[in-house]
Amino acid sequence: MKSKLTIQEIARLAGVSKATVSRVLNGRPGVSPQTRRKVEEVISRYSYTPNLVARGLSLKKTGSIGLVVAHTAERLSSHLFFIEFLRGINEVLDERGFRLVLATAESEDRYESSARALAQGGVVDGTVVLGVRRNDKRLRHFLAAGIPLVTVGRPIGFPKVDYVDVDNVGGARMATEYLLRLGHKEILFINGPRGHTASLAREKGYRQAFKPFGLEPDEALIVCGDFSFESGYEAVRERLARGWAPDAVFAASDLAAMGAITAFKEAGIQVGKAVSVIGFDDIPYAHFFDPPLTTVRQPIYEMGREAGLLLLLRLEGAGGEERLYRVFPTQLVVRESTV
Amino acid sequence: MKSKLTIQEIARLAGVSKATVSRVLNGRPGVSPQTRRKVEEVISRYSYTPNLVARGLSLKKTGSIGLVVAHTAERLSSHLFFIEFLRGINEVLDERGFRLVLATAESEDRYESSARALAQGGVVDGTVVLGVRRNDKRLRHFLAAGIPLVTVGRPIGFPKVDYVDVDNVGGARMATEYLLRLGHKEILFINGPRGHTASLAREKGYRQAFKPFGLEPDEALIVCGDFSFESGYEAVRERLARGWAPDAVFAASDLAAMGAITAFKEAGIQVGKAVSVIGFDDIPYAHFFDPPLTTVRQPIYEMGREAGLLLLLRLEGAGGEERLYRVFPTQLVVRESTV
DNA sequence: TAATGTTTTGAAACCGGTTACAAGCATTGG
DNA sequence: CCAATGCTTGTAACCGGTTTCAAAACATTA
């Protein structure tokens, strides 16, 4: 509970001025070797560390990065996405000595207000926004406050905002192609929410895959869900009830794929034998689901790292008027739910 | 990009002094109604918000709470634990206008250093530590810096540190009792890591359950794992290979239970029919595992809320010399993996 | 030895708030 | 009418750092 020492007290103990201690602390030149040694000795004896708040005020840099998350609890898949992403961004920030400040909320209104609180008040140097929407109000708060921004997913309506994204079109095309190449023709596509950026792109990829095979996607086999387990489950159950002869399913999330598989199981249909199901994300559970899930992997951890990196670059003045961005490729992970 | 206004400029615009603006901002008395109105008008016209860093320096309160997490990526189950916990603590902090600063790291060494960086430097008013160990070095950093602390899980070796915990003994006893009451006698107990606080408590609960039934636990059926899927899988596979006639399994984590079930499945043994398996945690996946998992639920979200609450209380001066703590009860969630 | 250049050092201002204290002013009572 | 009182307001110090600038100390050269 010994109250923290200030730079002033260290200065007194070392018999020098605050300015000199500050120079030593920051490795600045213009301090004689003897003096430097003396000050360092005092600093280490009292294991003094400077007050970062005061430093922040003086330098107008906080050393903190905000991470704004839509709804923490929205979906399980976003949970897992969030954790992986967090690991990635945390790693680069930690390496560079930056802290991560979280802004997230369950409800829509608190959600905007917590973003605003972060934007104003000058507690962060920059911020990463997860789960952007079209013309997201929160982005405006940060832009208005002049706080550098990186979004995850291309921010529609903000042509100058930096972002990281994954190649949703390519990933969905790859998955669909794979099913087509296996000989499947009737591929039920269980998409995410209508209008969601990723959903749009994945649908596009799904459609593109058919052309080289001289086939047309069946409009009746494209349905919207919400990435959830339930939406996959319902989509399949409903169609089976209507007498659909199942062939293959491409779900826009692993959870929906798991839901679909569960519906098949309940109907006594063997997934990975009679029908194929493919997911999207490669959440950690995918590989010990029964059957282990074939899916399109997103490099979430790397996206986290890259988001952090882009932001730090921007803070160092990189980019200028140019938009910084990076789009990651996806990867097909073949397991046992496809045949 | 309009640079932020300072209290000085607002004062000038309103024709008053900084002190008066400050009084208005903080709702302090001693400002005439007219002046107050005039200042408020200017504040809202320029949508001024005070710089929280400066305020923090002056008040010696940052409005930030640290959340120190062992290894973000350590185990999947901790991931899910982490997310739920985060939701809980975030909610109470958000309500009270506190921010959450994360300190977490993958590797052991960075891990301590990032905790220290948070402890010193005065960037947080208090902190919550997840995944404490015996005589955790990190705790000493916070204690030395005089920063209030709440741990999740009773901190062994720190008799005065506030904490929240779950009734591990009771939960494990309840699970074991349930299996015994179903008529099972040979209950394989797949525990967490040896020496882990929660492991010790759960083993104690397991043992306690046998007495009322006039039975003794079979020492050969108590094995240590690490809460992982693999550890559950291996424990069962190995025993089956040695000709064990399976009866029931109690795993100290849902993941290990899932691993155990997978091993049974591979051996053609029907879980929920021939044998019973029960887990611990009730992670979100438990209910759509196949079969849906019977488990002991921990109220993780509530523990998050409570941890935040205790910390805020402590910051307000509650407790004094007394230790603040709260131990949550567990709940048996019966699904289809037991019979 | 003086003049000059270079390095080391500290005083003071600043970052943007809060607050103790004193001053200014109007009201009230003796 | 003047002093005492209460309310409003501003001045200045402070929180703990960084940085500019000038002075001081020292080294170099003519």
Image: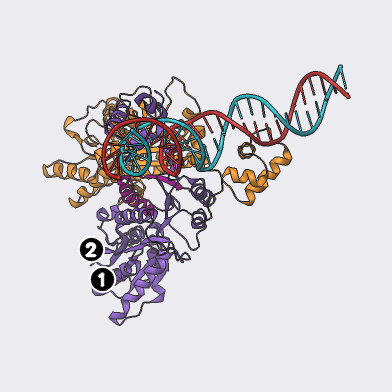
Chain colours: A orange, B purple, C red, D cyan
Name which quarter of the figure residue B300 lies in.
bottom left
User: In the rendered image, is residue B144 in sight?
Assistant: yes
* Residue most extreme to the bottom: B214
Subunit of mark 2?
Answer: B
Question: Judging from the image, what secondary structure is the residue with disc 1 in?
Answer: helix
Question: Judging from the image, what secondary structure is the residue with disc 2 in?
Answer: loop
Give the labeled residue for mark 1. Answer: B178
x, y percent for residue A292: 33, 49
- Placement of the C terminus of chain A among the 4 image quadrants: top left
The one nearer the camera, B169 or A240, is: B169
In the visual, does A96 lie left or right of A267?
right
x, y percent for residue B228: 40, 57
The one nearer the camera, B239 or A316, is: A316
Q: Which residues are magenta?
A: B76-105
Q: Name the amino acid type tagged 2.
A: Val
Q: Is residue B102 magenta?
A: yes
The one nearer the camera, A101 or B123, is: B123
Q: Earlier in the sequence, mark 2 or mark 1?
A: 1
CA neighbours of label 2 inside 10 A, class few (<14), some (14 to 19), many (20+):
some
Q: Residue at x 30, y 54 (%)?
A: B301
Q: Is residue B194 above or below residue A90?
A: below
User: In the rendered image, is residue A117 in sight?
Assistant: no
Subunit of mark 1?
Answer: B
Give the labeled residue for mark 2. Answer: B334
Name which quarter of the figure residue A144 lies in.
top left
**Marks 2 and 1 close (CB-CB < 8 Å):** yes
- Magenta stretch: dominant secondary structure: helix
Q: Name the amino acid type tagged 1.
A: Tyr
